[in-house]
Amino acid sequence: MLSMADIRSHVFKIQRYSLHDGPGIRTTLFFQGCPLACAWCHNPESQAMGLGASARETVPAIEALVETLVREIEKDLIFYDDSNGGVTFSGGEPLSCPELLFPLLDACRERQIHTCLDTSGFAPFKILKPAATKADLVLFDIKILAPLDHQAATGKPVGLVLENLKQLSRLGVDLKLRFPLVPTMTDTRENITGIIEFLTRETLYRDIHILPFHNTGAGKYERLNMKNKATHIRPPTKEQVEAVRQRFEASGFKTKIGG
Amino acid sequence: MNQRVAQLRTKSLAKKVTLSHERAELVTQFYKTRVSPDQSVPVQRALCLAHLLTHKQIFIDDNELIVGERGPFPKAVPTYPEVCLHSLEDLEILDSRPRVAYGVSLETKQVYAQTIIPFWKGKTIREKIFSAMETSWKDAFSAGIFTEFQEQRSPGHTAGGDLIYTNGFGDLKARIQAAVDRLDFFEDPRALDRQEVLNSLDIAADALIAFANRHADALEELAENEAVPKRKQELKDLAKICRKVPEHRPDTFHEALQYYWFLHVGVITELNPWDAYNPGRLDQNLYPFYKQDIAAGRLTREKARELLCCFWIKFHNHPAPPKVGVTAKESNTYVDFCLINLGGVTEDNKDGVNDLTYLILDVIEEMRLLQPSTMVQVSKKNPDRFVRRALKIIATGFGQPSVFNTDAIVQEMLLQGKSVEDARKAGASGCVEAGAFGREAYILTGYFNLPKILEITLNNGWDPRTQKQIGPRTGDPLGFDTYDRLFEAYVCQVAHFVAIKMRGSNIIEQINARYMPVPLLSLVTEDCIQKGKDYNQGGARYNTSYIQGVGMGTITDCLSAIKYTVYEQKSLSMETLLAALATNFEQEDRVLHTLVAAPKYGNDDDDADGVLQDVFSAYHKAVTGKPNARGGVYRINLLPTTCHVYFGEITGALPDGRKSGIPFSEGISPVQGADHCGPTAVLKSAAKIDHLKTGGTLLNQKFLPQFLETDQGITALVHLIRSYFKMDGHHIQFNVVDGKTLRKAQENPEQYRDLIVRVAGYSDYFVDLTSALQEEIILRTAHDPF
């Protein structure tokens, strides 16, 4: 067994009674490390990579980690059963640590615990594919379609993300989209039109969660001494959210505000 | 709500609570002039009730549809000098205290000075109790180890069953006659006692019938002089109802409500039983009348709603009798703990939720009154929509209804040896106390201070506050080389004080049996007639005495802290710890810091929760199954009302880092702010208590209002409740409130007069709470929606 401090280097937070990352009552494991650095990120502490490198290299350490985390996950089994909930792997980017993610997905599957993979989609398909097929449900971010804007806002190109999404659709993976509504950055008319067109043309996915930006992460940037690129952004108004929702709905999408 | 209800509600809310000397004066008059030495005590008490009901003023308010008041007018609260005599100083305090005040007129003070005090001084139950208690009891009482429920109020804690809905008092009188006819003075050497009890029940039955007829007379007179035809007819109809019930069994919804209400007023006029009286399973009891009336076209849903609203106002008109001293501290509120039960299962174990259940839920939401308290019983047989409807009312933030686990209550009853039918007809009354409604006298004897006993243990039996050796010398803690030694000492102290408490309670039960029988309550409690025994003598089918454990979270965290820091991590020595406690952690930040790191209850941590289970087992073992004086046994439950504040006040610094005087944890809730893993972890921890071995546990959870704003939030809460109940949790209730709002209410109480919060097993106006209690509620962990 490992202590919670040992776990922190791989999973920076374990949230029980999580209601916004998949169906029912869930336990969400937030993985440490993310290849993206989105301007609106409200978990900036999760971005830094490589903290767990030493443990990753040794298989026994991973085994102990999995065992400890599964125990944490199992604590709320009774609540998952009643609410059709389960566990969600979020982050950070869970796909950036497949060494841990895969055994966790396997362990949950063995125990018949519903799993949700909450991903940015920015990962090699050879990692994404097995993870997405092992998980019961994938929550997949779609942020900005224009390559330059995506690069500017997240630090990484969008091509891989879109290609991955097309592939998952072809495989028939159960997936819900998540659209971070960030005023001025993701809610432009062109971006939303582009997203709708892309999804309609290239995928079968018509279920989208609109996640309105909130600035609860602002304090974290200060504490971590990181540059907050979203200081000028205000949370969207109810009307703004409604307008975006209606655009998706008008194009045949099923929407939900929040997770 | 319609205009009638709105007017009555506004009036009741606006009315100031006053103290009435009417009852005290009539009782005194009765004992001065009407008591003769050849009457037995039960007969005297019944005649006293008859005297009261014959001479007390009748009050009928404009447009009322349910009639009957305990005082001469609404919110005029009587006193019970035969139980507890208020001194002039008490009256002064009640009149002038800033919170939970009772206005006392000059006339009342004069009557008290001239008539009441001179007659009753030296004759009250309270004085009998205190003079009968041994020194060790008094020392423990003064030290704040336990409180005593019967020192100002008579034994009670009873909810009515289904008896009155199929029997008029005429039928009960026939049962009494049959029992008298069966008396066998040859085979039964106690037959004379039984005859006297049966006579007293018969007198009490007649007294309440006469009281109802006095109302009928008054209503007829009012009808005579009423100009508005519609009201004239109402008054005539009401008069007819009062001529019929309680003498005859009710046939309509309106008659059933009025019948219960006369009984309610009668029981709380007879004496001041703790938790007043209670209609119990209201939707189950009234549904047959509702269904029949609707089918016959006699009643509409709207009319039923109006009658229920009027019924609600009657409860609101009746604040608790005034408490003083320690009793005011353990239960400092106007709320008199009448707890209406909805839902649950039927006698034949079917889903008990019906149309009327939903109508009553509407009434609760619409009336939004502190009294009566309300709760929903949730069985696995009940539909989710019922729980959702209740949660939508809870979301409006007035702490009602609370939520109970029917399946747990049924099992608790069965484990106590009750019949399965009685178990299914059971419920919870007061705050969370499970009982067989109408068939059980489950007397609460007092709160029991579990954390204080650790303070005593760490001082080798010595109480630092009262400077007395009140417990056995279980050893200097410096000499305890293992945690087990310390825990053994604690268990020994617990057993010591439980024994003192029980010795006292056994005497008190006998005092009440001998001097304060309750004929009317006995009349409607099964099987008093069959046994020919009073409620206070063990006449009920089941007779239980409870000692209510307080501070489970605090004592768990204290013992866990010692176990972890002193014995396992060895990060603190016992010496350092004791020194820090003695100085109330003055300049002991390092010690405090070390203690905070220990495992805490409420986080689904098996180390801390293991300590909780040990404490529970020790307390359960010390109490459960010991015989009481009424032919039943003692049991435990875990609830505090406001006693966790009082007990905290008189307890010094404790090893969980709590400073001297600070309130304890409430019910079985974690120490305020000690739980940080969310609600599922709290419920998992709480479920590690063996709820089924108790007669009730109380868990309070605080949620921010955003949590219940969406359907998704409500659904998640339904699941949370269902899961807790699957783990056999007894009860859960929710405060839906934002800490910021509470702070603002502290700063500007005038603007927040209407803000209601859940305290323990009841709701109250936030601005009416003491500041210590306000702080305690603010410090409870709030679960946020992210």
Image: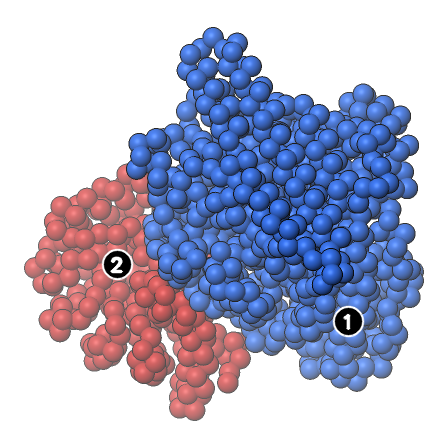
Taking the image as shown, residue A181 lies to the left or right of residue B342, namely: left
Query: Which residue lies at the image location 26% right of the left edge and 74% below the top edge?
Result: A135
Query: Is B394 in front, or is B137?
Result: B137
Whether residue B293 is situated above or below residue B633 in the rendered picture? above
Q: How far, Cα to Cα, is label 2 from label 1?
A: 60 Å
**In this orientation, does residue B247 appear?**
yes
Query: Which residue lies at the image location 26% right of the left edge and 55% below the top edge?
Result: A209
Say which colour chain B has. Answer: blue
Q: Chain of mark 1?
A: B
- The quadrant the C terminus of chain B occupies is bottom left
Rendering quarter of residue B565:
bottom right
Judge the density around disc 1: few (<14), some (14-19), many (≥20) Cα neighbours within 10 Å: some
Estimate the x, y position of residue B529 in percent, counting from the top left.
Answer: 63, 51
Estimate the x, y position of residue B346 in percent, counting from the top left.
Answer: 42, 56
Estimate the x, y position of residue A128 in percent, counting from the top left.
Answer: 23, 75
Query: Which residue lies at the image location 21% right of the left edge and 77% below the top edge?
Result: A133
Q: How many marks?
A: 2
Query: Which residue lies at the image location 52% right of the left edge and 76% below the top edge?
Result: A4
Observer-side mark, 2 or 1, equals 1
Q: Tell me, what colour scheme is on the image?
A: by chain
Q: Are marks 2 and 1 on the same chain?
A: no
Query: Is A32 in front, or is B128?
Result: B128
**In this orientation, does residue B737 appear?**
no
Taking the image as shown, residue A129 lies to the left or right of residue B244, namely: left
User: What residue is disc 2 on?
Assistant: A178
Query: Is A43 in front, or is B302?
Result: B302
Estimate the x, y position of residue B42 in percent, counting from the top left.
Answer: 75, 45
User: What residue is disc 1 on?
Assistant: B495
Which chain did the renderer colour red? A
Whether residue B654 is situated above or below residue B484 in the rendered picture? above
Whether residue A156 is situated above or below residue B9 in the rendered picture? below
Label 1 amino acid? Answer: Ala
